Image (cartoon, rainbow, N blue to C red):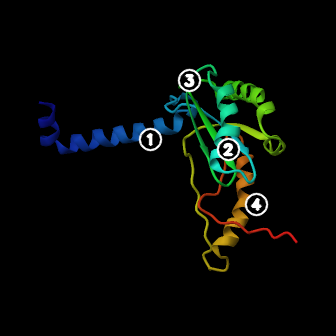
Amino acid sequence: MISDLFITRTRLAIVISIVISIAGTIAIFSLPVQQYPEITPPTVTVSAIYPGASAEVIADVVGGPLETAINGVPNMMYMSSTSSNAGQYSLSVTFEVGTNPDIAQVNVQNRAQLAISQLPAAVTQQGVSVRSRSPDFVLGIAFYSPDSKLDVLQITNFTSTTIADAISRVAGVGEASVVGASEYSCVYG
């Protein structure tokens, strides 16, 4: 058997494994990212804000018309929506693998425009956002203060106002967000 060959000749097994490892390392750096197959379906997110409304009201008044208008977009697999008591509504439309995300976003945007006239004035003033995004999490960066001069709130504020905006402007980045952080509160007087 072939296993007996590698058991009895360990030097041969070591040389072959080193050659395979070197070939794999060279191949990783020479393959362009565009040649990797798409394995996750593209997603288009529709979000709206209805200040002061409960989750049930948002689901009925905002979600109902948007979901009815968007349902049936070409190459759509399914939709899922969430609404919160903070006045936020989010609808994720998932498309078949291989669908062009830019075309999918345009199709969803066109369908969402049909429903905007049925939404409350407070929602249309805030705007309905349609964004194409990949559900893949590509990079996570942790920030800290090595000398402990900055607390968590100051680090979060700096990251939200400076770094997240700069990262989101990089070509190919769909969204940059600060996760699990608190923010400064605003007091109007």
Q: CA distance from mark 4 to mark 1?
A: 38 Å
Q: Which label was assigned to residue 98?
A: 3
> At 70% across and 31% down in the image, what residue appears?
65
Residue 152 in percent (x, y) is at 63, 72
> At 71% across and 50% down in the image, what residue appears?
53
Q: Which of the marked residues, 2 or 3, is nearer the chain's N terminus? A: 2
Q: Which of the marked residues, 4 or 2, is nearer the chain's N terminus? A: 2
Label 3: state its secondary structure. loop
Label 2: state its secondary structure. helix
Q: CA distance from mark 2 to mark 3?
A: 32 Å
Q: Amino acid at mark 4?
A: Thr
Q: Which label was assigned to residue 161?
A: 4
Q: Amino acid at mark 2?
A: Ile
Q: CA distance from mark 1 to mark 2?
A: 52 Å
Q: Nearer the viewer, residue 56 or 153?
A: 56
Q: Which of the marked residues, 1 or 3, is nearer the chain's N terminus? A: 1
